[in-house]
Image: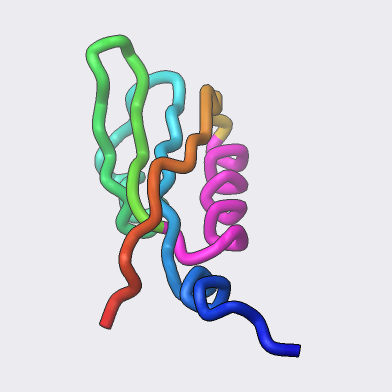
Amino acid sequence: MNEPHSSIENQFKAEIYEIRIQGHFHDRWAERFEGLTITRESDGTTVLCGPLPDQTALHSILLRIRDMNLKLISVNQAESAAPET
């Protein structure tokens, strides 16, 4: 059974996620979030943003947030990123 070309392309696109956490955390924790951009907002939240290759990577980040006892506010899928070449 042949699948449409577009569904094959979608398998290779990283999705951009925006993860909002209550509070600000120390810069040394940045390495735990696999290269996501960390932005400390003036409202006292921290936003982690960037491409994640799949749901496994997303769940890995969410587990780290849980294990660090940080309060998760929201997770939003922003857009698709082009595949790296």
Q: Is residue 67 left or right of residue 28?
A: right
Q: Is residue 76 left or right of residue 66?
A: left
For residue 70, above or below residue 37: above
- State how many labels appear: 0
- Image coords of residue 7 (percent x, y): 57, 72
Give 62 or 79, whichever is nearer the viewer.
79
Judged left or right of residue 27, residue 59 is right
Picture quadrant where residue 26 is located: top left
Q: Position of residue 37 (x, y in %)?
A: 27, 45
Please identify the residue farthest to the bottom as the structure is shown.
1
Q: Is residue 54 above or below residue 63?
A: below
Q: How is the image coloured?
A: rainbow
Q: Image quadrant for the N terminus? A: bottom right
Q: Quadrant of residue 20?
A: top left
Question: Residue 22's x, y, as percent?
Answer: 45, 20
| Residue 42 quadrant | top left
Residue drawn 26% across and 20% down? 41
Residue 57 lies in the magenta-colored region: yes
The residue sitting at the top extreme is 43
54 to 37, vertically: above or below = below
Point out residue 63 in the picture as x, y percentages from the top left corner. 61, 47
Residue at image coords 47%, 65%: 53
Quadrant in which the C terminus is drawn: bottom left
What's the magenta region? 52-68
Measuring 61% from the left and 38% from the top, which residue is drawn there? 66
Write the residue at 54% across / 39% down.
65
